[in-house]
Amino acid sequence: MSFKTDIQIAQEAEIRPISEIAEKIGLDDDNLIHYGKFKAKVDLQSLKNDEAPHRGKLILTTAITPTPAGEGKTTVTIGLADALSQLGKKSICATREPSMGPVFGIKGGAAGGGYAQIIPMEDINLHFTGDMHAIGAANNLLAAMLDNHIQQGNGLNIDSRKIIWKRVVDMNDRQLRFIVDGLNGVSNGVPREDGFDITVASEIMAILCLADSLKDLKKRLASIVVAYTFDNKPVTAADLKAEGAMTALLKDAINPNLVQTLEGTPAVVHGGPFANIAHGCNSVLATKFALEHADYVITEAGFGADLGAEKFLDIKCRAAGLEPDAVVLVGTVRALKMHGGVNLKDLKEENLQALETGIENLLQHVDNIKNVFGLPVVVAINQFTADTEREIALVREKCSELGVSVALSDVWAQGGAGGIELAEQVIRLSEEKSDFVFAYDLDNSIEEKLNAIARRIYRADGVDLTPNARKQLAQLNELGFNRLPICMAKTQYSFSDDPALLGAPHDFTVTVRNLKISAGAGFIVALTGEVMTMPGLPRVPSAESIDVTEDGKISGLF
């Protein structure tokens, strides 16, 4: 049996003019900055004088620890928004923008799949409205101004060995991780070791996603620490007088992007930090805008709940004063069997023993959401045809022991109609009282916060700081950054910092090898294990299958 590809489904869909979609949530053309007929930015300046804002229900979609078998978190997010629309609810899905690096590398797009997609998916997965390019330009402008300052006399006394600001590019490219630049003579700058991150790992991305206004954006940009002086004093973007020009480059990018689902539900797609190396959620402005214009806002956080959800709750919600009304935890029977030790090629066979072993991963995520953060949660099983009744029954049984319901989701095949059961559960849960709390207190020391995440969320024995990380810890304390939240940079494939440890491992420690201040974003990044801020391409990149016809029609994009 053959299935249409995601891009075939998207290209065959009836797409409505974006003005029609805007009307559904009370916007007119004066509130839009059009990028063609089918996508637009919402002009936040035009909404400033609106009446007291409406406050819809905020629903967070997260997932089990990802595997090559797939989970379908974005697909469920989109399908759930469509299902709520089918039930007569005014809904918006608020998702992240994809990075082109993974699109051309190994990952699926960030526009969903099957009959639960956001369109125009080709645009969204490629250049979209240029936000990524604006972020990269602002990042690299700051890098250029930093190196130029050193070249022009170094009045700030910057130690070029202590530069922490990297250049970025929106592509997976391991060749750029470590480079030497400024070579071949005095006119080409001061030679130094340098390197590139992928654009979504830039602090500029985090700042764009956490800023609540253009004024706040400029203030945060000014606070970025780019280097240290010879006497270990921090040097900021404000010291380089870069924040004004950087804000100018981001003036349009700060506005959320409005598109639509296949079924015409409004979708706000804005900001896309990775959850394994950054905080993994869409922008505060997009989420707040959606909450003011819908009764239900379905948003997602990247990778498993140990990363995306933890950062959504401990960083984004804390910074923005948000509180989710309910959480959807997405998993598949296939992926849980893989966590239980089944090889990828054998996942179609019923295996209750492996499922019972692997389900511990799901249950730990559920327990974290319910008992660490105090939020109502429903498990969404993203269905595959090979799932058996006995396997589904086992998942229901284990979840019921934790007092958590399970809903089947078939939105990939049926669109919104396949998410009705889940939507009904979400409506019910969102009316329940939550006891939302954070996983740690900001008054805790940096090391206490690291240990709280490791012990309470990962179920580790704690963290082990390398000598280098201990030196950085002392410096952060000395500079007064100790009250900031923590952004853990950790593999997405395990609760631990070892990607090979599947399921729900115990008796391990998390090694923190680097502590880096992101003063503009307002958090401390803790690098663990071997996680990289610049991914590489696989042996067979997805780019090999992507092509375009003479009439401009793209093929091979999922």
Image: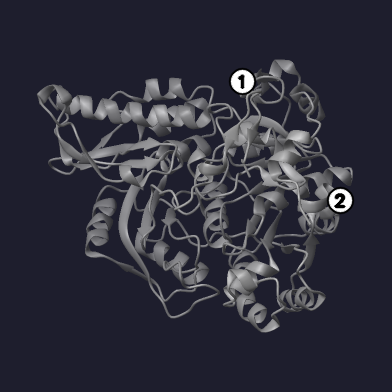
Q: Nearer the viewer, mark 2 or mark 1?
A: 2
User: Secondary structure under badge 1?
Assistant: helix
Label 2 vs label 1: CA separation? 36 Å
- Say which residue appears at 76% left-offset and 48% top-offset: 79
Which of the labelled discs sits on residue 417, or is there none? 2
Q: Quadrant of the C terminus?
A: top right
First in sequence: mark 2 vs mark 1 = 1
472 above or below 510? above
> Residue at the bottom extreme?
353
Residue reaching furthest to the front: 550
Residue 68 place in picture, x, y as percent: 57, 62
194 sits left or right of 278 in the view = left
Q: Position of residue 470 (x, y in %)?
A: 25, 61
**Vertical placement of 498 versus 209: above or below?**
below
Question: 225 or 374: which is nearer to us?
Answer: 225
For the question of whether residue 127 can be seen, the reply is yes
Q: Which mark is residue 298?
A: none
Q: Residue at x 24, y 41 (%)?
A: 179
Instruction: Name the residue rendered at 42%, 62% in the picture.
Output: 449
Residue 515 pos. (x, y %):
32, 54
* Colour treatment of the image: one colour
Residue 548 quadrant:
top right
* Residue 364 visible, this angle: no
Q: Three-letter amino acid code at disc 1?
A: Gln
Q: Residues within 10 Å of mark 2 (few under 14, many from 20)?
A: some
Q: Is 515 or 264 nearer to us in this picture?
A: 264
Q: Is residue 458 above or below residue 260?
A: below
Q: Check contact, mark 2 vs mark 1: CB within 8 A.
A: no
| Residue type beneath disc 2 | Ala
Is residue 237 placed above or below 419 in the rendered structure?
A: above
The residue carrying mark 1 is 45
The quadrant the N terminus occupies is bottom right
